[in-house]
């Protein structure tokens, strides 16, 4: 199963936020979307999820996303926004149950997600009473609950931004689980080190244009990142064998 | 909890039927003489329709606009409906097509005014963030609503100014908000039918309304077609508000307090919140109508709108405080 973006262009008035992008993302792999602020990452992800009007065509296995009726699309495409509403006067469990209509509720799956994302003990608390990081984990749990991994498209806009490092790792391990379960996972992320460690493929954006796409080890390389972000990067060899990317700057 | 709320609403309705205080006389509770029964029954049924409609409209506006301060009165929807009615009343007086009469009789003009005001508030309160997501600015929404309400109030004063003194006095009384004791049976039936249809439509959308508490992107991603839902819900709000205003004039705070009280009692899920808000609105307005039978300040019975503007404002502040502590 493949998500394909053909000549995607999105504009806000005179501003072209995303310009003629051609890219693909495959099931079973995690695609990270990387780029500076205002590079067009969020707009591109909203286009991919069928939430943003744009020129061009977005298809899942050849079927245009926008041709899928909205109710059916909700069963196949899940989107986690960068800015979920934090003042929704519902409990955590009520919030989770919004993800599926009554006939599709699976309490065991819901319970398992709440437990594995460590929000089980908050299930009867009101969402506005939670910390930002806890709210983000609840929204992540809801997004994962919405669509079955097999055959689903999962789009996440900076899902780990307000999370502490341990919970960010926990969240990313869930995304790996979704990809291993046969889903297409596309996420934007600012932490280049995390992007390199979690991603299989990468789309590098700057000022609305796609600079490079392909396997992370080919796209997220120090020379290209320095050209995009304007700061030097270096590759660090982890003791466990992985490659970590970090800004090679002196102390600020 | 809903059952208890229903019992409270029934109790207050029965109280409205049996409470009695003749001018200058003392307060008593007695089943009314058959000659008076029709008037009390009409006032009670009218208050039920108006209270339930305003509270339902307030709930729907608060959800769709994601703003706890939204209500038909604050957003200018009631004033828009009132302006529509006053304009039509003036037109009929001016052209002499049906003789001078009270503004409450032309419901379609109220509907046009209510929907027009709501459309202006919605369009001007909407913003778009840098990543393209549309959202409703809660502060802009209330500010635009207050300005629209003020402009419509100015328009109503303008039409008041254009009619002769006697009719102007009637207009002023209507503008205070009062529950009439005589309304034709057909009009009550028509109003009740539309109010019930609006409630059934909204109840049918209860899951979508729950989802609408989230952002636009989240709601669309979860399968809610926001465009058609907004159209249906805003139309329902226009119908409910215009029905209420055409029956009883612009009445403040029922559309604001009803939803907040219901949310405190039954939570925010619309499956319970919608009937809960209707029951709270009914209890509040019929209760206020009962209370005004008790108050005797020597100048005749106070219009229920005046009582609700003063008492409702204070009650809302109390509810606001409770809700802030709760969250």
Image (tube, rainbow, N blue to C red):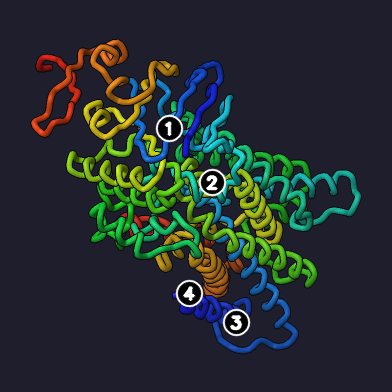
User: Which numbered tag is attached to residue B20?
Assistant: 3
Quickly name the residue at label 2. Answer: A73
The image quadrant of residue A116 is bottom left
Residue farthest right in this picture:
B97
The reply to whether residue B307 is in sight is: yes
B181 horizontally vs A149: left or right: right
The reply to whether residue B288 is in sight is: no
Q: Report crowding for label 3: few under 14, some 14 to 19, many 20 or more residues within 10 A (C-alpha).
A: some
Instruction: Determine whether the residue tagged by mark 3 lies in a helix, strand or loop.
Output: strand
Q: Position of residue B138 (x, y in %)?
A: 46, 40
Gap in angstroms between the C-alphas marked 1 and 3 = 75 Å
Q: Position of residue A128 (x, y in %)?
A: 32, 51
Earlier sequence position, callout 1 versus callout 2: 1
Gap in angstroms between the C-alphas marked 1 and 4 = 50 Å
Query: Relative to the observer, which residue lies in front, A28 or A31?
Result: A28
The image quadrant of residue A195 is top left
| Residues behind callouts 1 and 3 on a single chain | no
Query: Relative to the observer, which residue lies in front, A112 or B143?
Result: A112
Earlier sequence position, callout 4 versus callout 3: 4
Quickly name the residue at label 1. Answer: A25
Gap in angstroms between the C-alphas marked 1 and 2 = 18 Å
The image quadrant where one finds the N terminus of chain B is bottom left
Q: Mark 1 or mark 4: which is in front?
A: 1
Gap in angstroms between the C-alphas marked 4 and 2 = 35 Å
Q: Mark 1 or mark 2: which is in front?
A: 1
| Residues behind callouts 2 and 3 on a single chain | no
Q: Position of residue B320 (x, y in %)?
A: 38, 55
Q: Answer yes or no: do the residues labelled 4 and 2 have beta carbons within 8 Å?
A: no
């Amino acid at each position: 199963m493949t998500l394909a973006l053909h000549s995607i262009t999105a504009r806000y008035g005179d501003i072209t936020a995303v310009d003629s992008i051609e890219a693909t993302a495959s099931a079973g792999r995690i695609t990270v979307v990387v780029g500076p602020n205002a590079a067009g990452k969020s707009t591109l992800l909203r286009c991919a999820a069928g939430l943003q009007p744009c020129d061009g065509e977005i298809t899942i296995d050849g079927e245009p996303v926008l041709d899928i009726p909205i109710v059916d699309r909700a069963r196949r495409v899940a989107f986690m926004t960068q800015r979920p509403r934090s003042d929704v006067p519902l409990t955590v469990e009520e919030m989770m149950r919004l993800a599926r209509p009554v006939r599709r509720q699976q309490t065991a799956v819901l319970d398992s997600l709440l437990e594995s994302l460590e929000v089980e003990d908050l299930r009867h608390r009101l969402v506005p009473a939670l910390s930002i990081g806890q709210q983000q984990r609840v929204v992540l749990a809801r997004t994962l609950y919405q669509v079955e991994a097999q055959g689903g498209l999962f789009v996440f806009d900076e899902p780990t931004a307000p999370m502490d490092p341990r919970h960010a790792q926990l969240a990313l391990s869930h995304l790996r689980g979704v990809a291993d379960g046969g889903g297409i996972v596309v996420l934007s992320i600012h932490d280049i080190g995390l992007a390199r460690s979690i991603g299989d493929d990468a789309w590098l954006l700057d000022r609305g244009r796609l600079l490079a796409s392909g396997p992370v080890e080919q796209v997220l390389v120090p020379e290209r990142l320095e050209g995009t972000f304007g700061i030097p990067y270096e590759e660090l060899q982890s003791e466990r064998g992985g490659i970590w990317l970090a800004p090679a700057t002196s102390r600020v | 909890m809903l059952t208890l709320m229903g019992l409270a609403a029934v109790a207050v309705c029965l109280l409205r039927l049996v409470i009695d205080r003749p001018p200058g006389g003392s307060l008593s509770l007695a089943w009314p003489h058959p000659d008076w029964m029709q008037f009390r029954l009409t006032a009670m049924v009218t208050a039920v329709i108006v209270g339930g409609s305003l509270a339902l409209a307030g709930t729907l506006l608060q959800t769709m606009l994601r703003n706890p301060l939204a209500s038909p009165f604050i957003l200018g929807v009631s004033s828009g409906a009132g302006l529509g009615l006053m304009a039509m009343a003036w037109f009929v007086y001016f052209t002499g097509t049906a003789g001078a009469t009270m503004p409450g009789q032309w419901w379609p003009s109220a509907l046009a005014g209510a929907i027009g005001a709501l459309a202006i508030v919605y369009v001007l309160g909407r913003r778009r963030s840098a990543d393209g997501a549309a959202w409703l600015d809660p502060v802009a929404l209330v500010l635009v609503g207050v300005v629209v309400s003020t402009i419509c109030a100015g328009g109503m004063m303008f039409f008041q100014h254009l009619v002769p003194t006697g009719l102007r006095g009637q207009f002023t009384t209507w503008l205070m908000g009062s529950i009439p004791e005589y309304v034709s049976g057909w009009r009550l039936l028509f109003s009740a039918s539309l109010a019930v249809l609006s409630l059934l439509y909204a109840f049918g959308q209860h899951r979508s309304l729950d989802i609408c508490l989230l952002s636009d992107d989240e709601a669309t991603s979860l399968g809610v077609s926001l465009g058609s839902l907004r159209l249906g819900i805003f139309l329902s709000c226009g119908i409910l508000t215009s029905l209420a205003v055409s029956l009883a004039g612009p009445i403040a705070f029922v559309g604001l307090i009803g939803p907040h009280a219901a949310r405190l009692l039954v939570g925010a899920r619309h499956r319970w919140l919608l009937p809960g808000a209707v029951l709270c609105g009914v209890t509040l307005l019929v209760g206020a109508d009962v209370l005004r039978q008790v108050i005797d300040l020597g100048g005749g019975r106070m219009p229920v709108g005046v009582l609700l503007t003063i008492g409702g404002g204070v009650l809302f502040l109390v509810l606001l405080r409770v809700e802030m502590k709760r969250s």
